[in-house]
Image (cartoon, rainbow, N blue to C red):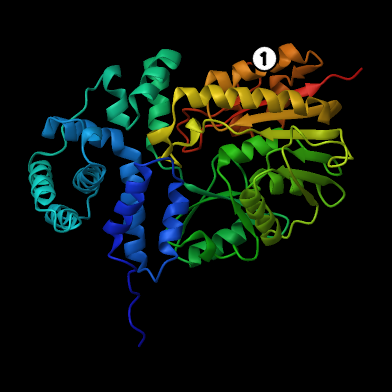
């Protein structure tokens, strides 16, 4: 009999602490940091799950934890030493948000991470035992408690309340507080959703057909994505339902030529490639070398043959790089603040700010104007961002239409015709797709479908 898997390093709590300590120092891709940690040594699946739960949980609820810890300690958590505040958050999360970890273990194991620092160990022990006995203090229930109640930084809670009112801000906060499900876009040309669902269920996962998108599957379970049946064969792509709706909004037809201007990692690229078929072509532009490698790897895994990858900034490519412009469809899934995917990337709430929104809006305007001439007369331009902020959504579209009167919004009924019927409820009166604050477990995306006038 082979020995049981050995946990790398000093266990899941120390791994979570190391990742969270780095996150508290500066912006960090939490998922990528955990993947690097798990690549070191051999991890018991249970320890891997615990490390991820603790890291994502503290990242998601940092501002709720800090509010409660300030009430207990009488001190602002951000004024503490980084090591102390990281350990406090780690211990407090286990006590307040987990049900399977005994309180004594949460306290003792967290204190142990302080090593030989007797003063820190005593401080942690006192605070955490108080929390274990009395619970995390409650946050205010009204609009003034929105931030700590739903784990939002104060600047964002105030911004959403001012922009959307209490009800709209609450909806966006609840969306950000919930981790979205794992959703697969099935490559239906190669396998039926039913056949793939059966294979996934046999592997120990729970599979639920999407209520929004025919053919998409929601999957729950402890099997890592690369180990899911069909992954290596390229039978599916992990893609949130809202992201899939953006790809459908382009309404690409067989034989058409499509430009995907910011293509990596390739979800919408491969979706569009399937729509245009072998007689069509997708030109996928990506300027970042690392992201371009991910794009290429996904194209190879899905065995996609009708995509041409171009390196560079989509706004600055000349006729030599894009000799076949203009295109029937142009998709600009633009760099953005990402405030619609805080549920998926909770680390974003630690370091994002209002200045970043303004910077993204400037870049989005630059890209939109530069790509306008890549659309043929009568063609369609889809502008998408994974955020709901007005500067990056409706205001960005209005500014573009003012500068380019040869473009017009696609009427709502035409936009709806490209989407499955259940998705029509997320189309605004102007025909824009807006899933920010939705209650269906999807990411928050905005997409405007524009057409270039003929003649």
Q: Tell me residue 223's x, y (percent).
A: 45, 62
Q: Which image quadrant is residue 298 in? A: bottom right
Residue reaching furthest right? Answer: 455
For the C terminus, which image quadrant?
Answer: top right
Residue placed most toward the observer, 320 or 62: 320
Q: Tell me residue 58's x, y (percent).
A: 31, 44
Residue placed most toward the observer, 47 or 16: 16
Find numbered disc 1 in the image and state the secondary structure of the residue it sits on. helix
Taking the image as shown, residue 133 lies to the left or right of residue 161, namely left
Q: Which image quadrant is residue 427 in? A: top right
In the figure, 350 relative to 276: above or below? Answer: above
Q: Tell me residue 238's x, y (percent).
A: 57, 51
Q: Is residue 316 visible?
A: yes
Residue reaching furthest bottom? Answer: 1
Residue positioned 66% across, 21% down in the render: 431
Residue placed most toward the observer, 181 or 401: 401
Q: Residues within 10 Å of mark 1 (few under 14, many from 20)?
A: some
Residue positioned 42% across, 55% down in the render: 34
In the figure, 203 relative to 424: above or below? Answer: below
Residue placed most toward the observer, 63 or 251: 63
- Can you identify the residue that label 1 sits on? 399
Taking the image as shown, residue 17 lies to the left or right of residue 181, namely left
Q: Which image quadrant is residue 272 in? A: top right
Q: Tell me residue 282's x, y (percent).
A: 79, 45
Taking the image as shown, residue 16 lies to the left or right of residue 38, namely left
């Amino acid at each position: 009999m082979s020995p049981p898997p050995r946990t790398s390093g000093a266990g899941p709590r120390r791994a979570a602490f190391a990742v969270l300590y780095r996150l508290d120092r500066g912006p960090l891709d939490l998922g990528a940091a955990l993947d690097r940690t798990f690549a070191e040594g051999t991890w018991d699946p249970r320890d891997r799950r615990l490390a991820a739960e603790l890291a994502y949980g503290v990242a998601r609820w940092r501002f709720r934890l800090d509010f409660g810890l300030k009430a207990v300690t009488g001190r602002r958590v951000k004024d503490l030493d980084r090591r102390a505040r990281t350990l406090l958050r780690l211990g407090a999360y286990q006590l307040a948000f987990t049900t399977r970890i005994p309180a004594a273990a949460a306290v003792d194991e967290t204190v142990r991470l302080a090593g030989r620092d007797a003063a820190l160990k005593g401080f942690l022990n006192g605070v955490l035992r108080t929390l274990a006995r009395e619970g995390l203090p409650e946050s205010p229930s009204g609009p003034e408690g929105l931030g700590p109640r739903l784990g939002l930084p104060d600047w964002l809670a105030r911004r959403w309340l001012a922009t959307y009112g209490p009800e709209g801000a609450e909806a966006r906060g609840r969306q950000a507080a919930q981790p979205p499900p794992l959703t697969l876009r099935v490559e239906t040309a190669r396998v039926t959703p039913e056949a793939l669902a059966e294979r996934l269920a046999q592997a120990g996962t729970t599979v639920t057909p999407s209520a929004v998108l025919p053919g998409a599957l929601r999957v729950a379970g402890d099997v890592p994505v690369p180990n899911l049946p069909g992954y290596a064969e390229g039978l599916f792509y992990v893609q949130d339902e809202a992201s899939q709706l953006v790809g459908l909004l382009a309404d690409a037809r067989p034989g058409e030529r499509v430009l995907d201007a910011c293509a990596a990692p390739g979800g919408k690229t491969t979706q569009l490639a399937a729509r245009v078929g072998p007689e069509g072509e997708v030109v996928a532009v990506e300027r970042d070398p690392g992201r371009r490698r991910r794009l290429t790897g996904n194209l190879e895994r899905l065995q996609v043959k009708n995509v041409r990858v171009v390196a560079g900034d989509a706004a600055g490519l000349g006729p030599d790089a894009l000799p076949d412009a203009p295109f029937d469809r142009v998709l600009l899934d633009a760099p953005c603040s990402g405030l619609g995917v805080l549920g998926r990337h909770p680390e974003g709430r630690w370091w994002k700010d209002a200045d970043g929104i303004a910077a993204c809006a400037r870049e989005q305007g630059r890209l939109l104007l530069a790509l306008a001439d890549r659309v043929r007369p009568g063609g369609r331009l889809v502008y998408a961002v994974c955020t709901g902020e007005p500067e990056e959504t409706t205001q960005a579209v209005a500014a573009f239409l003012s500068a380019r009167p040869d473009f017009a919004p696609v009427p709502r009924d035409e936009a709806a015709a490209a989407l499955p019927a259940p998705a029509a409820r997320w189309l605004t009166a102007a025909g824009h797709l807006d899933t920010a604050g939705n209650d269906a477990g999807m990411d928050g995306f905005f997409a405007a479908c524009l057409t270039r006038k003929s003649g």
